Amino acid sequence: MRVYASRGVRSRLRRLGARSPLDAALLDPDLASFAGWVRAVVEPRFRSGLEVMAKRVAVERLSTGSSGLDRLLGGGLEAGYVTEVAGEFGAGKTQLCHQLAVMVQLPREKGGLSGKALYIDTEGTFRPERVLSVARYRGLDPELALESVLVVEARGELELLSAVASARSSEARLVVVDTLVAPLEVGEGVEALARRQYALSRLLRMLREAAAGGRVVVVANRMSMDRPAGGLALSLGCHYGLLMRKLGGSRRLVELVRAPHLPPGSAPVVIEEEGVLDA
């Protein structure tokens, strides 16, 4: 890909929070006029099916901590891809996110990636006590495990944009956003809805870039009118989609509702002090 930009555009884009002239395409319309002139020429690269297959075989996977859920996902959450975890309040989305922040620290032979987690908390639901309890059960030093979880509080839209942008250069192997739509402004009318969807598309584009750097990206999502919030923009922006449902008590059902190559299915789990476990 070749990029042509007017004089001084790069410095202006950096001040606006963009890493390259290409990011100008996703700037807020009110800011884009200050960025300058940018034109990109895309030259597609063709690969054989065998090359693509070889790349797929080499994809790393992160265990969820539940063998049934791992089987549902074809071996675990894939590095390089974005997974949405949706569900109603109390379904267990945040519980699973906390567990993943511990699982990523395990060695590869135990289903982890020997890495750190970046936890972007938009609703104030991160609980270090939960990380400690899961870490003890998984055989990790609780305090060291907690130190390996990098937490960013992002209650507003600009804070969230900044946090997600920084994830693209983070040392973390897991990026969690809990939840993605909470900080986005909700207004009335078509124009407000369009601006919200535009912001959501920008966030998902940056999350896909973060995933492309070899990270597992997980996005928790609330429900709206019995459907995952965010509409089509969020669905198209995530490669995999999980839906968590309450079954009563500590029992939950995790459904695979969207995947490029896997059939729909479900896996029962329970939420205990030790984490999200097989039912």
Image: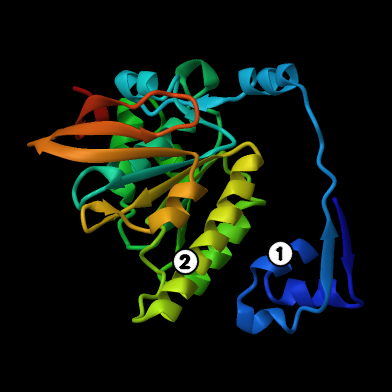
The tag on residue 49 is: none
Residue 79, by quadrant, is: top right
Indicate whether 143 appears above or below 29: above
Image marks 1 and 2: residues in contact by CB distance under 8 Å: no
Q: Residue at x 42, y 31 (%)?
A: 103
**Residue at image mark 2:** 197
Where residue 107 appears, as percent x and y from the top left, is 52, 22
**Residue at image mark 1:** 23
Indicate whether 124 appears above or below 149: below
Calculate the distance from the C-alpha at mark 1 to the C-alpha at mark 2: 17 Å
Display coloring: rainbow
Give the class, few, some or many, for how many residues have Cα within 10 Å of label 1's Cα (few <14, many ≥20).
Answer: some
Amino acid type, label 1 = Asp
Give the residue furthest to the right. 7
Q: Residue at x 64, y 67 (%)?
A: 26
Where residue 124 appears, as percent x and y from the top left, is 32, 62
Amino acid type, label 2 = Gln
Decide if residue 20 is in sight here.
Answer: no
Give the class, few, some or many, for how many residues have Cα within 10 Å of label 2's Cα (few <14, many ≥20).
Answer: some
Give the residue furthest to the left. 248
